[in-house]
Amino acid sequence: MSSDNNVQSIDRALDIIEVLSQENEGLGVTEIAGRIGLPKSTAHRIITTMAGRGYLNKTDRGTYKIGLKLIEAVSCYINSLELQTEARPYVAQTTSELGLTSHLGVLDGDQVIYIEKMDVFSNVRRYSQIGVRVHAYSCSLGKCLLSNYSAPQVRKIMVNCSFIKFTKKTLGSVDELIADLDKVRSRGWAIDDEEAEIGHRCIGAPIYDYRGDIIAAISASGPTSILTVDRIEPVAQYVRKQALEISKSMGYIE
């Protein structure tokens, strides 16, 4: 199939979604085809593909409605926007109060994506660094996010991870990671103690949604000369407090 045909198919699929979004009871293939001006055979092919992927749902009456997968995808995007909006003041406050760089991150496979950042030396966010991906096993955000999963689930998530040793302190295997995650769960926070970079320390805490699932994490980081050993515990407790406040704003109840 040519690229032009691919684009046309995507355009038609979006037309189908727009039509069905206005019909709570769903529509049949013939009705959908008539609404968007497609041959019935073409509409049937596209609808069958979308239903097979879960983006449309076929009812007992043979009509089609918006599927759960599409609803979940849209919900995740909306929740991400809400999370950033709710968390941004706390990220800024963490940097201001602690004199450390703060991050907000979410898990994507075996990596963490930064979705918010506040630098210690400026109140202006550096957009170029939002969207950066880092290895989950070697950062405090990643450990917080992975602590949401059981050992078998962590093994599955990390199955393709090579566990590169960035420093002598970097976790070297999934077994070491799983053992470290037990500590994260018991104390409620995680630390990257020169595991990603020599001379750099980072402390993170998990953020929960209304279901009690970990959906993100917030961290405070800096040089070991500033985030010294004696500051680890007080910084950890402050970051935990900020994470809890963000969690409450997302509907979490202790």
Image: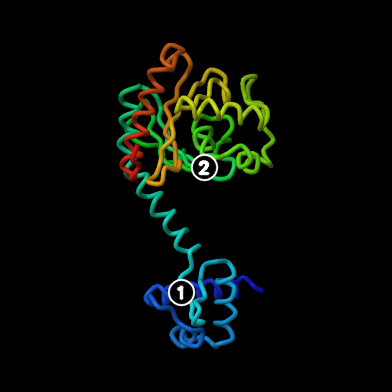
Instruction: Return the residue found at the far top.
Output: 230
C-alpha distance separating marks 2 and 1: 30 Å
The disc label shown at residue 9, or none: none
Q: Residue visible at 51% across and 39% down?
A: 148
Residue placed under numbered mark 1 in the picture: 65
* Residue holding disc 2: 107
Residue mark closest to the camera, 2 vs 1: 1
Q: Position of residue 43 (x, y in %)?
A: 54, 82
Q: Where is residue 84 in the image (x, y as percent from the top left)?
A: 37, 44
Q: Do the residues labelled 2 and 1 touch (CB within 8 Å)?
A: no
| Image height of 215 relative to 219, above or below | below
The amino acid at mark 2 is: Leu
Residue 181, image x, y percentages: 55, 30
> Which color mode does the image show?
rainbow
- Residue at figure coordinates x 43%, y 31% from the top left: 205
Q: Identify the secondary structure beneath mark 1.
A: strand
Image quarter for residue 127? top left
Earlier residue among tags 2 and 1 = 1
Crowdedness near tag 1: few (<14), some (14–19) or many (≥20) residues, C-alpha within 10 Å: many
Tag 1: residue type? Lys
